[in-house]
Image (cartoon, rainbow, N blue to C red):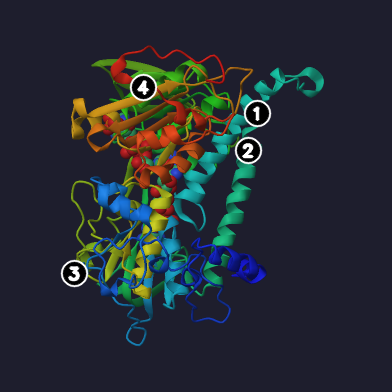
Amino acid sequence: RQFIQADRAFLQRIRSSGVSTINQSSLRYVSGTSSKMPPPIFPIPDERANTVAVGGDKNGSHEGEKTSPQVQKIQKTSSDASASVHHQMSPQSPANTSPVVDGDKFDYDFVVIGGGSGGLAASKEASRLGAKVAVFDYVQPTPIGTKWGLGGTCVNVGCIPKKMMHQASLLGEAIEDAKSYGWELAGGGDKKHNWGAMVQSIQDFIHSLNWKYKVALRDVNVSYINSYAKLIDKNHIHAVNAKGKEVTVSAAKILIATGGRPKYPEIPGAKEYGITSDDIFSLQYPPGKTLCVGASYVSLECAGFLAGLGFDTTVMVRSILLRGFDQDMAERIGRAMEESHHVKFIRGAVPSKIEEIEPRQDGKAGRLRVTSTQNGKEIVEEYNTVLFAVGRDACTSTIGLEKAGVKVNPDSGKINAEYEQTNVPNIYAIGDVLDGRPELTPVAIQAGNKLARRLFAGSKVVYDYEMVPTTVFTPVEYGCIGLAEEVALKKYGKDNIEVYHGRYRPVTTRPIAGYGEEHCYAKLICNKLDDERVVGLHVLGPNAGEITQGFALGMRLGAKKRDFDDLTGIHPTDAENFVSLLITRSSGVDLSLPQCCG
Ligand code: FAD
Ligand code: NDP
């Protein structure tokens, strides 16, 4: 709006030239109930100029709006549901609720259980849209007593501290690279990492975020209640705080956003002597020689930064690396970690017993004896720290779901919900508690915001769980969107898939030091039946997260191989390798490393 006011004449010129400009209605914000309330940060999505009305109806807020030619094309040509931009609910959908505010009958219009990524997003958006909202958030300490503040897994014991430790480890490598560029360390000494100083900085940063989250809730008039909440029926919640103080509130609508917590294997010594990702980011002593049990996101990421920080690190793999991901890429990650970062892998093994040899003390890790079984044989090894990353349990078993009649999948313990609505119509669920959905922060946030707009602003836009981009922050990062190669082959048939791939030299980092270049790799998986639409994009290399985020938009818009070919690269970058992938898997041509600039 400021921009428009500042340069009306410029906009007028554009309009008269026939180029379409921002739809004014897309900038209209819905005002909240409080005079102190800031405007919502998002335009109301139904009113976005290019929102696609998939099966839209008269109530779909798209009357009179034109769908852009680009989007029309996608709707017409896409055989893949994932290529659509926005999904809209049918009028019969269960969560197609009107913006009802039942404040007279209940204490709150909307109570959210869980102040993590999803719960905070949904609660703030609901409040901005005029609902009376409360959030319950309470952290139960880990077996070794670690606890944290408001914000949930991502900010306290997940994405944020993980990315910071990943960065700390990359910086250690950058110091080595810097020497190739002429930098000298003062005194000619070698680099040395201080675990305590790193943990302190990270925890200080997290505490500042905890505070900001509280302020953000207060700013939009959301009541924050730091108590453990349980449903007592479909409209009532009972909660207890750390001092035993109890409160009961009623709500018209309830959102379950309680996330998950790490699992421990059921073996002797696991809880007594092991730690998990809930502990590692605030560990008061350097972990020393570490065994990471598990072979998925959490284990590989933790092993990656620990090795990068200089710790002797081993990953114990029960079956395969990164189940559910492209296995060609997973094996490349394993090789990169082994060869460039000296991470050891024990394959086909599970721990059976952890014993203490020497207890951990303040400032010092203990000594643990780990007995494991590998292919039927017993192996025994000593470690200072054992970090379990063997999956997560959804926090659904102790929150009274049965009292309200909310059903969970007995196998996963997770909540089944269509359009985030459970089988009990006024109870919703988002984030890591949802069955069959990706456990990722942006997924929880997007689903939470969209749900709040449906519940309190009459929106019909639902979150599309397809084509979710993600990145595994191993030392050489792995980013992907769409299908794994083996899944694409199965879905479309071997004859209908072409894979374009290539190795590349990273230019964004380390061109002189040469680190990691033997592992950098880009791959596009294309569906020949659909004019080589790209159904999977995979990249292993520095900053893969940044690269993947950019291309994710193209993928969601239905990009084909020729769109990548027609795209002009930005030189010199790593991402530009995707505009010049010429070698097909079917040609069998050997992938040698290019000399330099293509
Ligand atoms: P959470 O963020 O877990 O929040 C749930 C909250 O509810 C918690 O604060 C919990 O204490 C509270 N709670 C539970 N029960 C109750 C109750 N009965 N009463 C009151 N409060 C309760 N995702 C990414 O996208 N990128 C990453 O890089 C990434 N890295 C990760 C790294 C690690 C080590 C881990 C473990 C996860 C990572 N994730 C990442 C996943 C991401 O953190 C989660 O998907 C996301 O936090 C889920 O949000 P949520 O709102 O569902 O739950
Ligand atoms: P996952 O459930 O993805 O993986 C669990 C791993 O532990 C698998 O390798 C599994 O092996 C192994 N395992 C399970 N039980 C045992 C056992 N008893 N003994 C030995 N190994 C075992 O869990 P994660 O904790 O890694 O991740 C949870 C979720 O968090 C992810 O799905 C992801 O969505 C999110 N996350 C996202 C990140 C990101 O975006 N960068 C980073 C970290 C987490 P097997 O394959 O044999 O079953």
Tag 3: amino acid: Gln
Residue that extends furthest to the bottom in the rendered view of this protein = 104
Image quadrant assignment for residue 202: top right
Disc 1 crowd, CA 10 A, few/some/many (<14, 14-19, 20+): few
Residue holding disc 4: 331
Disc 3 crowd, CA 10 A, few/some/many (<14, 14-19, 20+): few
- Which quarter of the frame holds ligand 2? top left
Answer whether labels 1 and 2 touch (C-beta < 8 Å): yes
Tag 1: amino acid: His
Q: Secondary structure at mark 1?
A: loop
Reply above or below: 557 against 584: below
Mark 4 CB lies closer than 8 A to ligand 2: no
Q: Give the residue displayed 23% in from the left and 63% down from the top.
A: 55
Disc 2 crowd, CA 10 A, few/some/many (<14, 14-19, 20+): some
Reply above or below: 200 against 569: below
Of tags 2 and 4, the one toward the viewer is 4
Report the Cα–Cα distance between label 1 and label 2: 8 Å
Q: Secondary structure at mark 4?
A: helix
